[in-house]
Image (cartoon, rainbow, N blue to C red):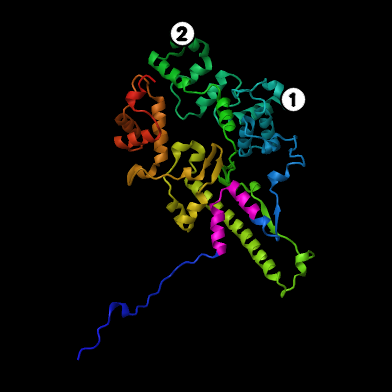
């Protein structure tokens, strides 16, 4: 006689599964990691306000302010901490990262406060040296430090110097451009081509190329920087500062001056100290103590993780600090996660919303991540962001009467070691909002 038939639902099955359960402390640590500096400040203050065992020690940037909210006027670097975003404040922020000796930075900061609207020095350098009680060589060194800041051309004493400072930053300036800027500006303005050609030995085509190169320069760099500063309703608070040291080493510093420092309150002699273990308030005191320790630990873990991620990013992108965006290498979140032994989602939280101040400006940390152009050969060594930068430079330097087609741009990029198809060039051009060659003709 056949036995009973077992229905599928009557079968018993035993499985073993692993599931990661996040504790409340882990969730809080991940949430803190995802917050940029400005939001972190607000969040920590709100949590501290609800916990009687947490005390906030104000950061150095806040303690420097006096009771009426004004900083000491002895040092212009100090004065800029509380200033609204202005041309002077933008330049002083860059001076803090320069690594120059403090007396030299202070002198350069004073000069930054004496620029006109164009960003040119508004008084003779000899007069500045007299007011600052510096030698001529010291004043010249301070001016050179100011002129090394961004944008190129800042701190110039005249149009000639302004243009030359910008040409000095270009890796390959147009032939003859420096000579025109140095000696032939009056003749150039009067369009005395034959006189210039006879004096320089340049052909008319070379003169035209050099003239176009000078026209692309900015004779009033201060106006652009001041406009960008004034247009921001709120100054960007960087989460990290990155620069190269005197020996070329990478220096990474978290902007801890903006982060409130927390500590456990001393309750040894306060009313909470008298709460006995059996008292109904004891559980509340202990929960506050645990929450305080968890928050302090979470902030320390955030600092450690963020510092590791920023350092790993700029160890890969070290060339950016010297050559700017064209030197950006391909880099993904997965690359950094593998290098640091972290989960990719942890790196993503560390990068999200963070700003990094470099000697070239303040940028989102995510801007330093870019996919490779492709697999194999030179494509693996070039990032999409660097390719777009080179593409924009080629278009900016082209002849407006004969603009380059997408195929010609692809060929020029290939000569620079950036292999792109014509369709990819067209895609990147559209993303950069650059019109087609037919629309650029005669612009």
Residue 276, x across and y down, in percent: 74, 73
At a point 56% along the width and 48% down the height, the residue shown is: 36
Give the secondary structure at mark 1.
Answer: helix
State which quadrant residue 87 falls in: top right
Crowding near the residue tagged with mark 1, few <14, some 14–19, many ≥20 C-alpha atoms within 10 Å: few
To which residue does mark 2 refer?
Answer: 192
State how far apart marks 2 and 1 are (Cα).
Answer: 42 Å
Give above or below for 386 relative to 87: below
At a point 38% along the width and 44% down the height, the residue shown is: 372
Q: Is residue 129 left or right of residue 11?
A: right
Point out the tag, 2 or 1, that comes first from the N-terminus: 1
State which quadrant residue 269 falls in: bottom right
Q: Is residue 388 left or right of residue 322?
A: left
Give the secondary structure at mark 2.
Answer: loop
To which residue does mark 1 refer?
Answer: 131
At a point 71% along the width and 60% down the height, the residue shown is: 52
At a point 64% along the width and 65% down the height, the residue shown is: 290
Residue 216, x across and y down, in percent: 47, 23
State whether residue 153 appears in this view. Answer: no
Residue 93, x across and y down, in percent: 62, 37
Give the residues in magenta: 24-46
* The furthest residue to the right: 269
Crowding near the residue tagged with mark 2, few <14, some 14–19, many ≥20 C-alpha atoms within 10 Å: few
Residue 234, x across and y down, in percent: 60, 38
State whether residue 75 appears in this view. Answer: yes
Q: Is residue 84 left or right of residue 172?
A: right
Q: Is residue 35 magenta?
A: yes
């Amino acid at each position: 006689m056949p036995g009973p038939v077992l229905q599928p639902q009557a079968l018993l099955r035993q499985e073993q599964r692993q599931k990661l359960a996040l504790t409340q402390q882990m969730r809080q640590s991940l949430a803190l990691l995802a917050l940029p500096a400005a939001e972190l400040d607000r969040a920590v203050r709100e949590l501290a306000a609800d916990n009687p065992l947490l005390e906030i020690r104000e950061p150095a940037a806040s303690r420097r302010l006096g009771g009426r909210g004004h900083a000491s006027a002895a040092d212009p670097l100090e004065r800029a901490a509380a200033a609204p975003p202005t041309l002077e404040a933008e330049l002083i922020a860059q001076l803090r990262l320069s690594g120059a000796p403090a007396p030299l930075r202070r002198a350069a900061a004073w000069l930054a406060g004496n620029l006109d609207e164009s960003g040119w020095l508004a008084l003779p350098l000899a007069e500045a040296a007299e007011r600052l009680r510096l030698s001529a060589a010291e004043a010249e060194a301070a001016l050179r430090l100011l002129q090394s800041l961004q944008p190129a051309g800042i701190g110039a004493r005249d149009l000639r110097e302004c243009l030359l400072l910008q040409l000095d930053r270009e890796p390959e300036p147009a032939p003859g451009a420096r000579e025109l800027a140095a000696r032939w500006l009056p003749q150039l303005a009067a369009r005395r081509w034959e006189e210039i050609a006879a004096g320089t030995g340049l052909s008319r085509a070379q003169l035209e190329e050099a003239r176009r190169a000078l026209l692309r320069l900015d004779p009033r760099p201060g106006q652009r920087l001041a406009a960008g500063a004034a247009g921001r309703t709120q100054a960007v608070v960087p989460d990290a500062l990155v620069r190269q040291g005197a020996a070329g080493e990478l220096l990474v510093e978290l902007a801890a001056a903006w982060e409130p420092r927390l500590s456990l309150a001393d309750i040894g002699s306060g009313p909470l100290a008298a709460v006995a273990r059996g008292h109904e308030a004891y559980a509340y005191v202990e929960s506050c103590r645990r929450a305080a320790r968890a928050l302090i630990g979470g902030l320390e873990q955030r600092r450690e993780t963020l510092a590791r991620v920023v350092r790993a990013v700029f160890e890969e992108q070290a060339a950016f600090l010297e050559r700017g965006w064209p030197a950006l290498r391909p880099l993904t979140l997965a690359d950094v996660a593998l290098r640091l032994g972290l989960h990719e989602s942890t790196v993503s939280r560390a990068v999200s919303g963070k700003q990094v101040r470099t000697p070239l400006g303040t940028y989102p940390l995510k801007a330093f991540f870019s996919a490779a152009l492709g697999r194999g050969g030179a494509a693996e060594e070039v990032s999409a962001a660097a390719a777009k930068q080179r593409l924009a430079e080629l278009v900016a330097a082209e002849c407006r009467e004969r603009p380059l087609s997408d195929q010609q741009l692809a060929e020029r990029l290939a000569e620079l070691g950036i292999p792109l198809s014509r369709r990819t060039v067209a895609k990147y051009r559209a993303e950069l909002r650059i019109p087609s060659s037919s629309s650029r003709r005669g612009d």
